[in-house]
C-alpha cells in the first residue's frame, strides 16, 4: 500500500520546523511558502548546455558532492536539472533531468498533462508546483544527507482516482559513462572514476518497480498505481545517491528526513536575525546574510577521499576550486561559527589534518592528497578562526584539541620565515620561487612584490627580502588570540608569555613599518631602513589587529577615507586608486575590491572609534554591487569604480566576509598589552 502523507503524525513537527525568521508558517503541503524574503535569494534556474556548463547557480546542501537546479523558466517538463557531480573530472553534469514525471489515468491509460505553475528555491530545498484537471502535484528536492538527494512528490486530487506515476530521467552523454538498470534501480557509472549515481523509487515499503534504459534515457515504473482520495495528499519519493563504493542504500524515513531538514535550516536562519547595518533595513541585511549562508553551505563538501573532515570549497562555479584552501578555510570557519559551528570546527580540522612535522600547514588540500600544495602556506588566521568558534560556542574541548597545533603553526613562521631573526617574519616558499612566496601572501600579483627577491633561510625554507606588514600584524594578533585561548585552558604561564611577546612585536611593527610622512603602514626591506611605499590594503591590517597607536590609526584612517585612494564607489580596493598600476577589472590584486580585505578595513575603522565612517563604507559594500541585495551571487572580487562583480561566482570568502560584516560587534580597540 502506498504511503499517504500522515497529517496527524507529522503536522505538528512540520509546522514547528517551518519557522523561518521567527514566524510560524503552515506546512509545505498546505501550499504556503516560508517568509517571502527567504525565497529565491539566489536564482537557481538553469539547464546545462553541455556537461561542463557552470554558467548558472546550482543547489547543494548537507555536504553533498552532487547538485541540482530548477529548469529554466518556461520549461514545462517536470523534474530538476542534474545531477552535477563536483568530484567527477573537476565537475561534470552527469544528468540533464532528474525526477521527471509521467502521469497516466490507470483506467483509460490516457496521459495526464501537467501544467507547470511555479518554481522557487527556498533555504534547503528546490520546489516545483504543477496542476492538471482536478489534480495538484508538488515536487520538493532536498538532501537527507551528503550522499542522498530526495525528491518528495505530493499529489492531491479533488476526486477519487487511480493514477500511474512513472519516473523518467536523462543522463548526460559523457565519454565512458555507462547506464544500467536492475532490481528497479538505475545506475550510472563513469570510466576512470569509482563514483556511481544510483536512482530509485520509494513508496513507503511498497517499492516494487521496473527500471529500464534506452540510450541516455531511463524509466522507473512502479508496479502499483497510486490510489488518490479526495481531500488527502499522497506522498511518494524518488531518490538519487552518489557513492564511491558498494555501500548499500541508507535506511531512512523520508518524511522524518524532511522534518530534520527543516529543523536544521531553522537553526541556521535564526542567526540571520541578528544581522544589522546602520542605514540598511534589517530585512535587506537579513536577506544578504541568508544569501551568504546559502553560498557557504552550497560550497560545503563532506569528507571524502583524502579529505578527512568536511569543509567548504572556494566556489563550485570555478573548476579550479575543487579542494580546501588554508586562509579561505580560516575565513569560512570564522563565519560558519555563527550558524554552523560543527562545520566550522571540521573546516579547521580539515586543514590541520595535513599539518607537517615542522608545524607548517599546506596552502591547499584535495580529494587526492598527491595534489596538495606544499610550496607555500597562507597568512596566519587559523587562531583567529578558532577563537571565533570558541566565542560563539564556548567549546573548551575544541580549544584544547587545537591549541598545541596552533602553537606549532605560529612558531613555524618565525623558524622558517624570519631571515634575519629580528622577530618580524617574511612571506616565502619551500621551493625558493618568488611566485610561491607571493601566493603565500594570498595577494598573488600585488604590486608591493614586483621588485622582491628570494633569500634562502635553510633547506626548504626561503623568504622574500621584505617583511610584510600584514603578515606581522596577523602574527601580532595571533599572539593575543593565543593568549586568550591559553587563558581558556588555564595555562597562565603561556598566557603571560604570549602577551609579553605581543608587546615586543607591537613596538617593532610601529617603529619599522609605519611611515610618518605618508601616514601609512608599508612592508619593510630587509637589512635597511626602507619601506616599500605601495598603498595597498595591507596598510590597514595593523588597525584591524590593534597594533597601531591612536595617532597612527588617525593618519591611516585619513588615507582610507580619501576618495582618490580607497574611498571609492565600492570602497577599499586592494591598491590605491591613484597608483599607476591600478587595474580594477583585470588586475586581480592590483585594484579590485576583495571582500575579506574590505571587511578588515571596516573593522579597522570601528576598532579605533571611527564608527560612522565604518558604517558608511560598509553600506557601500552592501548596496553598490548590482543585484547583491536581490538575486545576484557573491563574486570573488569587485570593481571599486562600478561595484560590478568579477572572477568566480558564489565565492565563499566573499560570503563569509559579508556575514561577518553584518554581524560584527567591534566598536572599539581591544585591550592590548603595553608597548
Image (tube, rainbow, N blue to C red):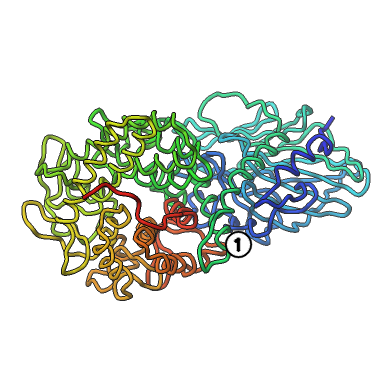
How many labels, in total? 1
Relative height, residue 465 to residue 496 (above, below): below
Residue drawn 93% across and 47% down?
159
Which one is nearer the viewer's eye here, 529 or 246?
529
For label 1, the residue is 283
Classify residue 15 by image quadrant: top right
Using residue 458 as the reference point, say whether residue 558 is left or right of it. right
- Extreme residue in the left direction: 528
Coordinates of residue 106 in the picture (x, y in percent): 88, 41
Tell me the element at label 1: helix
Coordinates of residue 374 in the picture (x, y in percent): 26, 38
Relative height, residue 661 to residue 169 (above, below): below
Coordinates of residue 486 in the picture (x, y in percent): 34, 34
- Badge 1 crowding class, 10 Å Cα cut-off, few under 14, some 14 to 19, many 20 or more, is some
Coordinates of residue 477 in the picture (x, y in percent): 29, 47
Using residue 227 as the reference point, say whether residue 501 is left or right of it. left
Relative height, residue 420 to residue 587 (above, below): above
In the rendered image, the quadrant that contains the N terminus is top right
Which one is nearer the viewer's eye here, 273 or 153?
273
Classify residue 263 by image quadrant: top right
Residue drawn 66% across and 25% down?
251
Relative height, residue 577 to residue 170 (above, below): below
Amino acid at each position: 500500500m502506498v504511503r499517504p502523507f500522515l497529517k496527524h503524525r507529522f503536522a505538528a513537527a512540520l509546522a514547528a520546523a517551518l519557522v523561518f525568521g521567527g514566524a510560524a508558517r503552515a506546512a509545505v503541503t498546505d501550499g504556503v511558502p516560508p517568509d517571502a524574503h527567504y525565497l529565491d535569494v539566489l536564482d537557481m534556474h538553469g539547464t546545462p548546455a553541455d556537461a561542463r556548463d557552470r554558467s548558472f547557480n546550482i543547489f547543494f546542501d548537507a555536504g553533498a558532492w552532487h547538485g541540482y537546479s530548477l529548469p529554466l523558466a518556461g520549461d514545462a517538463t517536470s523534474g530538476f536539472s542534474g545531477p552535477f557531480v563536483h568530484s567527477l573530472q573537476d565537475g561534470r553534469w552527469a544528468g540533464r533531468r532528474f525526477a521527471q514525471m509521467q502521469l497516466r489515468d490507470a483506467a483509460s491509460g490516457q496521459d495526464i498533462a501537467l501544467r507547470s505553475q511555479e518554481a522557487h528555491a527556498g533555504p534547503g530545498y528546490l520546489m516545483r508546483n504543477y496542476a492538471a484537471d482536478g489534480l495538484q502535484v508538488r515536487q520538493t528536492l532536498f538532501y537527507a544527507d551528503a550522499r542522498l538527494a530526495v525528491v518528495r512528490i505530493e499529489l492531491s486530487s479533488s476526486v477519487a482516482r487511480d493514477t500511474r506515476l512513472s519516473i523518467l530521467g536523462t543522463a548526460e552523454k559523457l565519454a565512458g559513462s555507462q547506464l544500467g538498470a536492475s532490481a528497479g534501480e538505475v545506475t550510472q557509472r563513469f570510466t576512470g572514476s569509482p563514483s556511481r549515481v544510483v536512482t530509485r523509487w520509494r513508496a513507503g515499503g511498497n517499492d516494487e518497480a521496473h527500471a529500464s534504459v534506452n540510450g541516455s534515457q531511463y524509466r522507473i515504473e512502479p508496479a502499483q498505481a497510486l490510489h488518490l482520495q479526495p481531500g488527502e495528499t499522497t506522498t511518494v519519493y524518488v531518490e538519487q545517491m552518489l557513492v564511491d563504493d558498494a555501500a548499500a542504500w541508507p535506511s531512512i524515513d523520508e518524511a522524518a528526513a524532511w522534518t530534520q531538514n527543516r529543523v536544521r535550516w531553522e537553526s541556521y536562519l535564526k542567526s540571520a536575525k541578528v544581522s544589522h547595518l546602520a542605514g540598511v533595513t534589517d530585512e535587506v541585511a537579513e536577506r544578504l546574510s541568508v544569501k551568504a549562508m546559502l553560498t557557504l553551505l552550497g560550497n560545503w563538501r563532506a569528507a571524502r577521499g583524502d579529505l578527512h573532515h568536511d569543509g567548504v570549497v572556494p566556489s563550485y562555479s570555478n573548476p579550479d576550486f575543487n579542494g580546501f584552501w588554508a586562509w579561505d578555510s580560516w575565513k569560512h570557519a570564522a563565519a560558519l561559527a555563527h550558524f554552523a559551528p560543527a562545520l566550522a570546527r571540521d573546516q579547521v580540522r580539515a586543514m590541520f589534518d595535513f599539518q607537517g612535522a615542522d608545524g607548517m600547514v599546506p596552502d591547499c588540500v584535495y580529494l587526492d592528497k598527491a595534489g596538495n600544495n606544499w610550496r607555500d602556506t597562507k597568512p596566519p588566521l587559523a587562531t583567529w578562526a578558532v577563537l571565533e568558534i570558541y566565542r560563539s560556542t564556548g567549546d573548551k574541548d575544541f580549544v584544547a584539541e587545537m591549541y598545541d597545533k596552533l602553537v606549532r603553526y605560529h612558531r613555524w613562521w618565525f623558524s622558517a620565515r624570519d631571515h634575519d631573526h629580528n622577530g618580524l617574519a617574511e612571506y616565502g616558499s619551500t621551493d625558493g620561487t618568488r611566485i610561491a612566496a607571493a601566493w603565500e601572501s594570498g595577494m598573488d600579483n600585488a604590486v608591493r612584490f614586483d621588485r622582491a627577491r628570494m633569500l634562502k633561510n635553510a633547506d626548504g625554507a626561503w623568504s622574500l627580502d621584505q617583511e610584510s606588514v600584514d603578515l606581522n600584524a596577523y602574527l601580532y594578533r595571533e599572539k593575543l588570540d593565543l593568549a586568550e585561548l591559553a587563558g581558556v585552558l588555564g595555562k597562565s604561564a603561556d598566557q603571560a608569555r604570549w602577551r609579553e611577546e605581543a608587546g615586543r612585536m607591537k613596538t617593532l611593527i610601529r617603529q619599522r613599518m609605519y611611515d610618518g610622512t605618508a601616514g601609512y603602514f608599508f612592508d619593510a626591506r630587509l637589512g635597511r631602513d626602507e619601506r616599500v611605499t605601495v598603498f595597498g590594503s595591507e596598510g590597514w591590517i595593523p588597525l584591524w589587529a590593534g597594533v597601531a597607536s591612536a595617532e597612527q590609526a588617525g593618519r591611516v584612517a585619513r588615507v582610507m577615507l580619501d576618495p582618490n585612494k580607497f574611498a571609492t564607489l565600492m570602497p577599499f580596493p586592494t591598491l590605491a586608486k591613484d597608483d599607476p598600476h591600478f587595474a580594477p577589472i583585470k588586475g586581480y590584486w592590483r585594484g579590485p575590491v576583495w571582500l575579506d580585505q574590505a571587511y578588515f578595513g571596516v573593522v579597522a575603522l570601528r576598532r579605533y572609534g571611527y564608527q560612522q565612517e565604518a558604517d558608511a563604507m560598509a553600506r557601500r559594500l552592501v548596496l553598490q554591487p548590482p543585484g547583491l541585495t536581490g538575486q545576484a551571487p557573491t563574486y570573488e572580487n569587485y570593481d571599486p569604480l562600478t561595484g560590478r562583480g568579477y572572477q568566480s561566482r558564489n565565492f565563499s570568502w566573499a560570503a563569509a566576509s559579508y556575514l561577518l560584516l553584518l554581524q560584527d560587534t567591534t566598536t572599539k580597540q581591544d585591550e592590548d598589552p603595553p608597548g
